[in-house]
Amino acid sequence: MALDPSPAPTWVHVFLGFPLLLVGYFSVVIGSATAAGYEYRPKHDDVLYLPFIVIASAAFYISDVTSVPIPVDGWFVVFLPLGVAMYALDIFVWSWWVGVPIERGTEETVWKLPIVFGAIGEEYLYRGVLAVLIASIGTIWYVVLSGVLFGINHFSKGRSEIVFKSVNGIVYALCFLATGSLLAPVLAHVGYNVAYVSFVAGGVRFPTVHG
């Protein structure tokens, strides 16, 4: 996979930029909105998060950290159902872990739809930008770091989400490396998030261990 890393201090991008994404999100986005008279509600998280992740992605893009390859191939469409299957597997494993069936949600779709588009920005950051480190740390550590940082990004959802999302992030990184295109993990991530939105809004049912 051809990458064009810049001489920028890439470790600074990683250790100062990525762990501060959520800190920045909660302090700047929600803090500013609250100061403007907005009463924060957890169900608004995805709507608030979308513009933040877009701005964060744009900032990294403008800094020209690396040239991320995005070749297109028709067969990449298989990554969409792969993402759906990943979410179904997560639901199955989670039901086994907690010992109870996981029921479909009743949340309003309109508040969850932004998460589908947020997948694009997250893949650019956690798979594309971090790929600049491959030359210095190798593909294995890149895959691990990409997954773990992605998992930590979901710490506000609970410790279990860190585990699940770290594994998801590793799969997305492998998709990126296997195809040499950021489009592959983007499609897988979009498929995952579409399945998530459909499930929490009560649109589809996935098999669980106890239900």
Image (cartoon, rainbow, N blue to C red):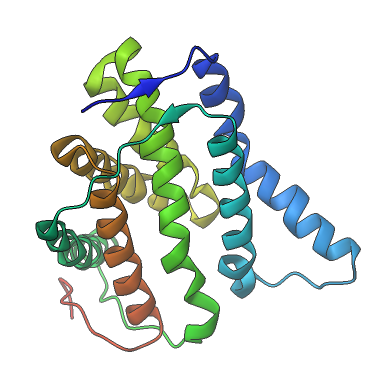
Identify which residue is drawn at 39% across, 51% down: 160
Identify which residue is drawn at 77% across, 50% down: 28
Identify which residue is drawn at 52% across, 84% down: 110
> In which quadrant will I find the N terminus?
top left
Identify which residue is drawn at 27% across, 30% down: 143
Quick one: which residue is furthest to the left in this view? Answer: 75
| Image location (x, y in percent) of residue 56 | 60, 45
Left or right: 116 as drawn, with respect to 184: right
Q: Please, is residue 210 above or below residue 73 in the view?
A: below
| Image location (x, y in percent) of residue 163 | 34, 45
Which of these two is toward me, 45 or 52? 52
Which of these two is toward me, 77 or 47? 77
Count of numbered circles on the image: 0
| Image location (x, y in percent) of residue 150 | 42, 42
> In which quadrant will I find the C terminus?
bottom left
| Image location (x, y in percent) of residue 118 | 47, 60
Residue 171, picture quadrant = top left
